[in-house]
Each structure stands twice: as structure tokens, then as C-alpha cells.
Image (cartoon, rainbow, N blue to C red):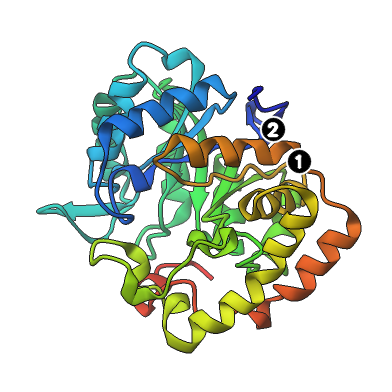
Amino acid sequence: MRTMPGTRKLGRQGLEVGAIGLGCMGMSQSYGAADEGESIATLHRAIELGVTLFDTAEVYGPFANEDLLGRAFADRREKVTIATKFGFDIEDGKVAGVNSRPDHIRAVAEASLKRLRTDHIDLFYQHRVDPAVPIEDVAGAVADLIAEGKVRWFGLSEAGAANIRRAHAVQPVSALQSEYSLWERNLEPEILPLLRELGIGLVPFSPLGRGFLTGTAKPADEYPDDDFRRNDPRFQGEAFASNMRAAAVVQAIAAERGATAGQVALAWLLARGDDIVPIPGTKRRTNLEQNVAAADVALAPADIARLDEALRPDAVSGDRYGEKMMAMVDR
């Protein structure tokens, strides 16, 4: 398989990465048992295929995912762009709430640098907006880290329009990370136009709808207790059946195009603009190779119209998160 073509710019501050990145969370949590050997092989294979953006966070594991990337990239740091995140208090291995106080941001940065075995974080995201800390203070703290050379670019995750604009006025934001896909279109009315006004790139996570858009999803009760999807509202009961019917068009177009359903879903995202870099997550080389090949899939306008109609927002049943996690989304 040849390497993925081209690079894309995120923001106006000089950040350029491959068109498809790699979400690394599932290597350490949320999607079944970890397999360190296969995960490291997948990370190394991603570099061979032209992937440059690798997404992690201190909370993944917690801490284990950053440590995994630090070990995997110790002898090839110059080939990768590492994005990690701050914004939570972690106590006894569990999230105890949001925390974006400037002193905490600095402490997280120092700890992440050690786990990642590097002297700089490429892209440092606020993981979730902290309503107790003005976003200007958050942006200022990251600006200080950038001035010191410990961070290169600033990002936000799941932030709303007002906080994006306010943060960007203090320290230019290079990327917003948020859930966006055929499966989840909440960014389109307000957030996407704002990002383009300000020149901020978009890094969609869960671009494959946690498996729904690949055709591999199962009802919630068929997943093990340590799999996030067991409690995902869209995988429950009648919502699951309805969502499978809505997603069938992705498989139909894939068959027509000689591609996989996941490749069609990623190709749809890539066609939304060259300022979008999805980060499908996987811990297996076979899935990675399929995902990267999506950069070669060209959808016709008629394909895109069929996808947009079949998976319009009112065709998808259930919230994308449970109530507790939805409450942390700044929208």
C-alpha cells in the first residue's frame, strides 16, 4: 500500500499534518482489552503510511496512553506530531472533575512531557471547557508554554462559539477537536462557519460513529463491560435498530465504489474541506490501513447528496453521549 497523499494545514500558525490522523485512546481504554504489542506495531505502521498526527491525552488510561506513545516514538520523535490534552483533575485513577487553572495546566504539561519522552508538545488542547476558569486565563497559560518552547500550538476540544472566539483573541487557536461525522452534524450551523472565519482547523474524533458507519456495530448488550459502547445511547434498543437502517446507505455506496463503508465515511469528511483532519481511532494495523486508504476514495456529488439525506441529523436516534458527558460539552 502506498503512503497517504498530501498534507493539510490546521490553523494559520504553521501546523501541517497528514490528511488522516490516528486517535490513540482505544489503545489504552474504552474499547476492550489493551494489546500493547499490536498497538505499538500500529503506531509504527501509521508512520510508514504517512500519518503524522497522533492524538492522546493524560486522561486516557489515565496516563497509560501518553506513556505508550512516549515509548513507541522514542526513536522517531521527529516524524510525528503529538497532540495531547489538559483539563481534568484525576484522583485515584478516575476523573474527579474539570480543572483548567493556569497552575494545573503547567503541571499537566510538565507531566505529559515526561511521559511522552519529549521536550515539547506539538498541539496542546483544553480537553473540556472549565466554567470556573475564564477562557482568557486558559489561553494565556498556554501562550506562556508556547513562549517557553514547551508547546507549539494551542487547541480546544468540544468548545462552544463564544469560548472559541475569546480564546483565539488571546492566543491563536490552531485546531478545534470535536465529534463530527455523517453520524454527528452538530457543528454545521454555527461552529464550522466560525472556524473558517477565524482560520481554525477542525480535527473530528469518532469520525466512524464508534463503528456504526463501518457496519460493524452491535447492540449495546453484546459489548463487554469495559467497552464504552455498552452505555452509548445510540447503541440501545430501538435506537440501535433505527440507526443501523439509517447507516445502511454508507455500505451501499461503499459496495458501488469498491471501498469499505469506513472509507466512504472518511471520504465524506475529507470532502467537507481541506481544513479538516479526522482522527479515526484503532489499535489494529488492518483497520489503520483501511482508514488511511480513504484518502484515495473520491465521492461523486450524487454520493454525497445521498449520504447527507440518509444521515441528516433527525435520522439519527439518541444522544451521542450519556447525560453526564453531554453536560461537559460547551454547546
In the image, residue 316 above or below residue 328:
below
Residue lying at 30% horizontally and 62% vertically, measured from the top left: 227
Residue lying at 24% horizontally and 37% vertically, measured from the top left: 107
**Residue 181: image x %, image y %?**
63, 60
Tell me the tag on residue 274.
Answer: 1
Residue lying at 72% horizontally and 46% vertically, measured from the top left: 270
Q: Between 189 and 259, which is closer to the camera in this rendering?
A: 259
**Residue 295: image x %, image y %?**
71, 37
Q: Residue furthest left?
A: 92
Q: Amino acid at mark 2?
A: Lys
Tag 1 and tag 2, C-beta contact below 8 Å: yes
Label 1: element kind? loop
In the image, residue 321 above or below residue 137:
below
Mark 2 burial class by Cα count in 10 Å: few <14, some 14-19, many 20+: many
Label 2: element kind? strand
In the image, residue 263 above or below residue 5:
below
Q: Which residue is mark 2?
A: 9
Tell me the tag on residue 29.
Answer: none
Left or right for 257, reference 246: right
**Residue 150: image x %, image y %?**
39, 24
Mark 1 burial class by Cα count in 10 Å: few <14, some 14-19, many 20+: some
Q: Is residue 173 visible?
A: no
**Residue 274: image x %, image y %?**
76, 41
Please state, as top left, top right, bottom left or bottom right, where the C terminus lies in the image.
bottom right
Left or right for 279, reference 83: right
Q: What separation in Å lies between label 1 and label 2 (alpha carbons)?
A: 8 Å
